[in-house]
Image (cartoon, rainbow, N blue to C red):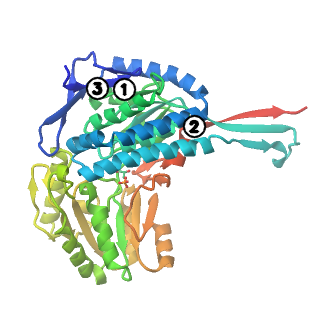
Amino acid sequence: DGDVFKYYADGEWKKSNSGKSVPIVNPTTRRTHYKVQACSQEEVNKVMEAAKAAQKLWAKTPLWKRAELLHKAAAILKEHKAPIAECLVKEIAKPAKDAVTEVIRSGDLVSYCAEEGVRILGEGKFLVSDSFPGNERTKYCLTSKIPLGVVLAIPPFNYPVNLAVSKIAPALIAGNSLVLKPPTQGAVAALHMVHCFHLAGFPKGLISCVTGKGSEIGDFLTMHPAVNCISFTGGDTGISISKKAGMIPLQMELGGKDACIVLEDADLDLVAANIIKGGFSYSGQRCTAVKVVLVMESVADSLVEKVKAKVVKLTVGPPEESCDITPVVSESSANFIEGLVMDAKQKGATFCQEYRREGNLIWPLLLDNVRPDMRIAWEEPFGPVLPVIRIGSVEEGIHHCNASNFGLQGCVFTKDINKAMLISDAMETGTVQINSAPARGPDHFPFQGFKDSGIGSQGVTNSINMMTKVKSTVINLP
Ligand code: G3H
């Protein structure tokens, strides 16, 4: 049946023998828009076998040739930005303009990875023994970075293309093979992206993309003995994956409750602009979104007024029109967000706008005077709802940030760089942005979550290194 998108294995597009498919619901229309194959465990086994075999040859392929193919894939990806972006609009309701940006950013990431790979993998170390006590200069150690084997990549719905290539490209340049399990919402965009790698001419079996139900193949993939590394971005599932996975390197980027600490001397116009961008772009469905504002009481009224004035200007509507606020990814997500809003209402938060929802579309909402007993003070809405907590001291802000079980990013706004540095040191998050909203990019910067926000550091360079192991050869002189 031509309606169901095929999965990709052994260099070919295939139908699943399961005869089953998985529907992808358009968040805007709330109707099934696409269908993908529901792959079986047996098909996963075949993919793994092919990935293992292809990797052996790929590891022997010269680094410059691997880079050349990645550059080719990057160019093809950029050429096909329109149809891929179209899928993102329909599957995850990403505003059309942002959808195109995601694809372009992905092409750039793949190229950057190829360039970075040829440099950092092109050199190893040479050590001599006599620096360690008791040794003569009789041992020479040569090290190089070699691939891990099969890398399993599991990206989330919010960046099905970009957070897939941020795993695929480092894996491939480092000589690994790659099995991709895209999120259900975003699977068709991911399949289109994989097609660009197919067109670039990578060897058969080196890249595979299996689609299906998490309940059927999720654990089977993450616990598969052929998998030598898992790179996952998403929610709580990551924690259970890390408990079940074998003794293999893991790269996990999970949730966040990124705090924005605003000091009395901050440039409030700059803060307001960053709160809007940081809190509401892609309707707050970013792990790095500003998720709680901690503002000094003395400037809180003024800041809230400025943010309110900007919230009114946000356009709300369909992703096709590139509206600022678009429907959230699913009905269950919208219900969850609504639950947080109702809890805050019941406990006395100040609503800066009226709460409004139609289907999965939730109007942007700023909640002032949020207190620590409200769920929204701690939980991640992943929607266009932003709590403001008024603080009496900077220490209070740092304390709230550090009391969270998340530790992805945070930001601090002040004109005093000394204070900013001290606050950055005190915040238990993987990254602290001074005078800007949190963000993962530029994509070669390190990116890591502390605590329940993840394990391992991403960013192009760190990902390439993480997807290799060190091999040493020691020459022993007589
Ligand atoms: O949702 C998680 C992403 O890694 C955030 O990326 O900061 O570029 O939106 P971003």
Can residue 107 be spotted in the picture?
yes
Report the front residue among 122 and 403.
122
Q: Give how far across and how far down residue 133 sits, in percent.
A: 83, 48
Residue annotated with mark 1: 220
Write the residue at 34% across / 48% down: 102
Q: Give how far across and how far down residue 262 sits, in percent.
A: 35, 75
Q: Judge: label 2 CB < 8 Å from ligand 1.
A: no
Tell me if 472 is positioned left or right of 371 in this view.
right
Tell me the kind of residue under disc 2: Thr
**Above-or-below relation of 441 to 304:** above
Check disc 3: other Cα within 10 Å, few if <14, some if 14-19, many if 20+: few
Check disc 2: other Cα within 10 Å, few if <14, some if 14-19, many if 20+: many
Residue annotated with mark 3: 216
Which-is-in-front pick, marks 2 and 1? 2
Tell me the kind of residue under disc 1: Phe
Tell me the kind of residue under disc 3: Glu
Check disc 1: other Cα within 10 Å, few if <14, some if 14-19, many if 20+: some
Residue annotated with mark 2: 468
